[in-house]
Amino acid sequence: MVVERRSWALVAVPAAVVGVGWVVRRVAVHAHSTGIAGVTPQAPSRDPARLVPAVRGHAEAAGVNPVLLMAILYAESYKPHVPLLERAWQVVHRDSAFGVANMHRLAYERTRPGRPFAGRAWTELPGDPDLAVQAAAWHLHDLRARLPLVIVGTFTADELVGMGYNAGVRNMLRFAHGTPPGPRAAAYLDRLREHWQRAEAALAAPQPPRPSVPVAS
């Protein structure tokens, strides 16, 4: 009987976690699609503003606009980035994204060769926000490098790269050559524009000084 109860617990607990992850994810997606997530104040533990030091450092290293990177983090903050829930959702939806920047495995694997995080695995993203920001910054760098010298239309380079982050490089190139974005890409661009001033304000806000590290004498 004890063995049966333990066996049942080993099945029930993961199943419960997956179920909770599914519910949280669906609620978050609804809030994201209806715009509620963009206007609802976030708890400090979820506010991407806490990642400003990482955004500044990794955006500079990758040569990308820190405001774009921060705006993407705000756009991708529609769901709680809790490692346990992210891993539970990945069990249900194998193509789900990981980390505070919602990065898919294929994008990560294409980005990391030759980079400072080349030895880090995609599965580490849920528990390491700094790695997630670093990977997103270099992914933006790679997308920007693929843009043509002449852009057809009214989109800025940052807007095209932002849409490319969501819709992929092939669609980004289509948009850069004058093809209108579809509803999903256009909606994502709208969210980036909505978060742009918020991202600028977060980056402009004074940051608390880092604690000094005592030097051994």
Image: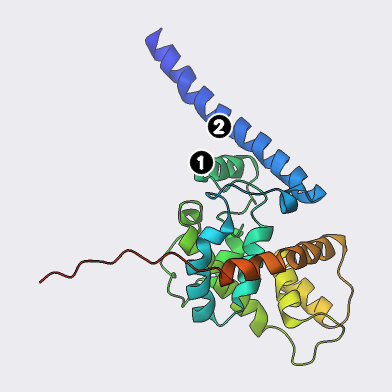
How many numbered marks appear? 2
Residue that lies at the very extreme toward the bottom in this rendered image: 149
Graded by Cα atoms within 10 Å as few (under 14), some (14 to 19) or many (20 or more), the crowding at tag 1 reads some
Tell me where residue 5 appears, x and y as whole percent.
44, 13
Residue under the point 10% across and 72% down: 217
202 or 2: nearer the viewer: 202
Q: Which residue is denoted by mark 2 in the rendering?
A: 17
What's the residue type where badge 2 is placed?
Answer: Val
93 or 65: nearer the viewer: 65
Graded by Cα atoms within 10 Å as few (under 14), some (14 to 19) or many (20 or more), the crowding at tag 2 reads some
- Please determine whether, in this image, residue 20 is positioned above or below residue 65: above
Tell me where residue 82 appears, x and y as whole percent.
53, 45
Tell me where residue 143 appears, x and y as whole percent.
66, 77
Q: Quadrant of the N terminus?
A: top left
**Figure colour scheme:** rainbow
Q: Earlier in the sequence, mark 1 or mark 2?
A: 2
Residue 95 horizontal side relative to residue 10, left or right? right
- Please determine whether, in this image, residue 36 is positioned above or below residue 142: above
Q: Which mark is residue 99?
A: none
Mark 1–mark 2 contact, CB under 8 Å? yes
What's the residue type where badge 1 is placed?
Answer: Leu
Q: Which residue is denoted by mark 1 in the rendering?
A: 84
178 or 59: nearer the viewer: 59
Tell me where residue 179 appears, x and y as whole percent.
89, 76
